[in-house]
Amino acid sequence: HYTSARMKSIGLQEFQYGRIDVRAVLPQGQGIWPAIWMLPTDEKYGGWASSGEIDIMEQKGGAKSQLIGHLHWGDTQSGDYHNTGNTIHVGNVSSSFNIYSLEWTKDYIAIFFNNTPFLEIANSRGMPYDNPHFLLLNIAMGGDLGGSIPEDFDEAIMEIDYIRVFQEDFTASIQEVPNKAKISMFPNPATNSITIQSATQLKSIQIFDLSGRSLMSFDL
């Protein structure tokens, strides 16, 4: 016997704008439909899909070398249904950890695989992505994307290393600097070098990449 499984953050953590990184190993096998996605906390513009859906990652049961990023929404003015998405070819994501990410601002939405964007769309007027959403992690059995389930199916595991949420309102660096001095860094995104300006003297600097790994640190 088997059943689909789902974890969701509604009532625990909801997010509006920012970046979400999920480092995961996906389940393998025919008939298994894993997904990392988001739905609105409140159906501000009506039921599905009027208030939107953001699919950070979906994978078909019979296409384990592909990943899908997709958005569904209803026009907030006309009510017309819209959707857009993209499919990319990947290596064996069932045997190693990879990072599935969303960047969401009032101006754009972008979906990434290992920090490389493969779906980008303007968050324009008429789209419902202006309110808090919650995160869902699930393994669906069968269904439209899962397909037929083998008779000898035993188990499926989606292994999560971490879920990290980055939001501008929660950057601690400015609040922890004496007198809340303004700090600026450019260019952003950085290339071969960066310039950091601060109104007060800093004692040390530590730089992290988008996955949270420390790249370098030094005293000043």
Image (cartoon, rainbow, N blue to C red):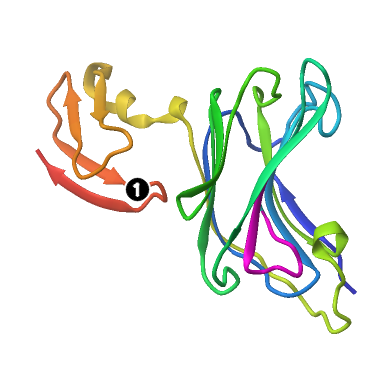
From where the camera sits, is residue 10 visible? no
What secondary structure is found at the residue carrying circle 1?
loop
Determine the residue located farthest toward the bottom in the rendered image: 152
Residue 162 x %, y %: 52, 55
Vertical arrangement, residue 134 with respect to residue 78, above or below? below
Indicate left or right for 42 with 195 as reference. right
Indicate left or right for 21 with 123 as reference. left
Quadrant of the rendered image containing residue 131: top right
Residue 106 x %, y %: 55, 23
Q: Quadrant of the N terminus?
A: bottom right
Vertical arrangement, residue 147 with respect to residue 19, above or below? below
Task: Determine the residue positioned at 73% across, 75% down.
Answer: 29
Vertical arrangement, residue 184 with respect to residue 134, above or below? above
| Circle 1: residue type | Asp
Quadrant of the rendered image containing residue 189: top left
Residue 57 x %, y %: 64, 52
Please tell me whether residue 64 belongs to the stretch shown in magenta: yes
Vertical arrangement, residue 109 with respect to residue 200, above or below? below
Tell me where the magenta segment starts and ends, as one range: 58-71
